[in-house]
Image (cartoon, rainbow, N blue to C red):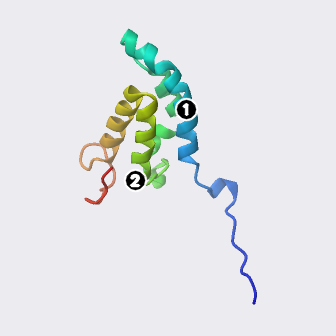
Amino acid sequence: MTKTATAIKPAAETAPDFAAIVRKLGEDFAARARTHDEAGSFVAENYEALKSAGLTAAAVPQELGGMGIAYPELCAMLRTLAQCCSSTALGLALHIRWRCQPGVGGTRRLPPSSRC
């Protein structure tokens, strides 16, 4: 019996570990969440961190320079963020919804079965 070698993708072709990225960012967001909530201040540094990590382009198709992340994975990412900083998760969810909504700013149609 011979074994078939499994091809390993080069690092450039390997998809980022979105869950790990969100967990790491979430730790920082959670540390600031109460302060922002009590002060009623905007979570600008969280959005800057999301942008630096490329997550503001998560829903943009790869052919347009985004990450092309699958909708269920987007939902999981938002749920994790919401547990850390609900303000950040809400803003990102609205951004993603706008990008994915056909005819508004989106570039692709999501199947009706794509629900969080």
The residue under the point 39% across, 9% down is: 39
In this rendering, the answer to whether 17 lies above or below 8 is above
Which residue is the extreme one toward the bottom? Answer: 1
In this rendering, the answer to whether 30 lies above or below 113 is above
Which residue is the extreme one toward the right? Answer: 2
| Residue 23 point in image, percent of width and height | 55, 38
Local secondary structure at mark 2: helix
Task: Give 11 or 66, whichever is nearer the viewer.
Answer: 11
Task: Give 49 or 28, whichever is nearer the viewer.
Answer: 28
| Residue 27 point in image, percent of width and height | 55, 29
The residue under the point 43% across, 27% down is: 85
The residue under the point 47% across, 55% down is: 63
Tell me: 6 left or right of 110.
Answer: right
Q: Quadrant of residue 110?
A: bottom left
Q: Mark 1 — residue?
A: 25
In this rendering, the answer to whether 45 lies above or below 76 is above
Q: Residues within 10 Å of mark 1 (few under 14, many from 20)?
A: some
| Residue 48 point in image, percent of width and height | 50, 26
Task: State the CA–CA distance, disc 1 to disc 2.
Answer: 19 Å
| Residue 54 point in image, percent of width and height | 52, 39
In this rendering, the answer to whether 22 lies above or below 6 is above
- Indicate which disc, 1 or 2, sits on the residue closer to the N terminus: 1
Q: Mark 2 — residue?
A: 72
Residue 45 tag number? none
